[in-house]
Image (cartoon, rainbow, N blue to C red):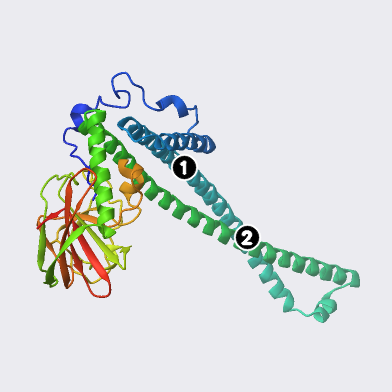
């Protein structure tokens, strides 16, 4: 479902001039690029965050307007600017962490020197006390010429013992401080690794957003009528899919099928409710939609292109963990997951829906198979654009049903 606007990028190089200032002749975008610009220093994290908040406000404002090519591009423009600001913030946070790590390294080095000095002093003091303990006070008094000399020696020993105790306390304090600083350094090094991984993902998402924005401009040729036609088709697909899963389709019972039996074929190319070849596969139990990955088995060959079809960015998690067979033969091309998917959150269709109730897949094979034994039904639904969306449903034991959309039979 919702493959609309996942277009080929092969023509992208010839339309690079179609950037944000070319909507509807001289018409200006909903919000200009400069509205949230400021003279933030690359070292001013608070300023960057304030600028990001400004763009997020602009995005919310644009999303509340009627969906059009202009408002859609305006939202994407804001998302691109937010992504760029997030990248700047992450880079600054990495820089700050690296500076803190450098400072901690210097402090640790100083503590090591201090510990070495204390250790040397402790060894000297311990050796001295060991020698003194070998001579008793009585023996010391016998060999001392005067009482005042003996008392002076004893006072010195007491001072030396106090000094040893102080050295021991300092050594323990320094050791604990050393351990704390070392642990803090290791923690910040882990944070740097996490931030660097986050930065890679942010750059990929930024590239995705820019490519998606350019795709829309290219394929609609900057034309509002073309955009609205694609928008209507996507709305119709959403409405039809939701209605079918709600049991509003017209169905005919066919009979029993076994796991692996052929039950339909994929529609090749675009159709009235889809812009490209794909299977929308859903699982329902007692009227409640389920995550198909809870049932489909793992260990198959696949490619994950759930972020942006042409860029093949793995945005949605591919994590099958059941024992059902797959409805099409591998290698599986996975283009949208279940739930709050990348497309539902970041794609241009996010203004139309926020939750995907199945998974979108395809492969080199166009044969659709039953994932488990059950009763086969063939159905269709007449959507708001007058197009019949065909589908098949297999009713399984324990109140489960599987749905297969964008098919022929």
Res 349 → quadrant: top left
Residue at image mark 1: 95
- Could you tell me residue 141's position as x and y percent? 85, 77
Depth order, front residue of 399/58: 399
**Which residue lies most toward the right here?**
147
Res 202 → quadrant: top left
Question: Residue at horizontal 25%, vertical 34%?
Answer: 227
Estimate how packed mark 2 is, as few (under 14), some (14 to 19) or many (20 or more) residues with alpha carbons within 10 Å: some
Please name which of the two marks, 1 or 2, marks the residue nearer to the observer. 1
Q: Secondary structure at mark 1?
A: helix
Question: Residue at horizontal 33%, vertical 21%?
Answer: 27
- Could you tell me residue 127's position as x and y percent? 66, 71
The C terminus appears in which quarter of the rendering? bottom left
Q: Is residue 142 left or right of residue 44?
A: right
Residue at image mark 2: 174
Q: Is residue 215 left or right of residue 33?
A: left
């Amino acid at each position: 479902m919702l493959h609309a606007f996942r277009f080929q990028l092969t023509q992208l190089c010839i339309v690079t001039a179609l950037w944000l200032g070319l909507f509807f002749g001289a018409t200006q975008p909903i919000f200009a690029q400069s509205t949230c610009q400021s003279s933030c220093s690359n070292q001013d994290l608070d300023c960057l965050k304030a600028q990001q908040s400004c763009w997020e406000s602009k995005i919310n404002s644009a999303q509340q307007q009627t969906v059009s090519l202009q408002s859609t591009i305006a939202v994407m423009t804001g998302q691109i600017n937010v992504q760029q600001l997030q990248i700047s913030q992450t880079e600054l946070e990495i820089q700050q962490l690296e500076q803190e790590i450098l400072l901690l390294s210097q402090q640790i080095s100083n503590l090591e020197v201090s510990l070495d000095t204390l250790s040397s002093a402790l060894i000297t003091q311990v050796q001295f006390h060991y020698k003194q303990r070998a001579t008793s006070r009585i023996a010391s008094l016998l060999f001392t010429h005067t009482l005042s000399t003996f008392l002076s020696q004893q006072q010195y020993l007491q001072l030396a013992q106090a000094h040893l105790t102080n050295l021991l306390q300092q050594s323990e304090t320094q050791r604990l401080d050393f351990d704390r600083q070392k642990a803090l350094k290791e923690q910040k090094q882990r944070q740097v690794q996490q931030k660097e991984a986050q930065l890679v993902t942010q750059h990929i998402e930024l590239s995705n957003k820019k490519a998606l924005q350019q795709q829309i401009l290219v394929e609609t040729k900057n034309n509002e009528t073309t955009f609205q036609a694609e928008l209507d088709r996507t709305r119709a697909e959403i409405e039809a899919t939701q209605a079918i899963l709600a049991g509003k389709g017209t169905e005919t019972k066919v009979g029993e099928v076994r796991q692996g039996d052929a039950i339909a074929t994929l529609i090749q190319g675009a159709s009235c409710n889809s812009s490209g070849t794909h299977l929308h596969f859903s699982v329902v139990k007692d009227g409640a939609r389920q995550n198909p990955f809870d049932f489909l088995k793992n260990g198959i060959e696949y490619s994950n292109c759930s972020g942006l079809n042409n860029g093949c960015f793995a945005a949605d998690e591919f994590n099958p963990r059941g024992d059902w067979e797959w409805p099409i033969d591998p290698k599986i091309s996975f283009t949208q997951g279940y739930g709050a998917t990348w497309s539902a959150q970041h794609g241009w269709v996010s203004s139309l829906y926020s939750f995907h109730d199945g998974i979108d897949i395809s492969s080199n094979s166009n044969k659709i198979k039953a994932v488990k034994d059950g009763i086969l039904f063939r159905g269709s639904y007449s959507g708001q654009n007058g197009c019949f969306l065909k589908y098949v449903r297999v009713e399984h034991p324990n109140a489960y049903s599987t749905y297969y959309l964008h098919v022929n039979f």
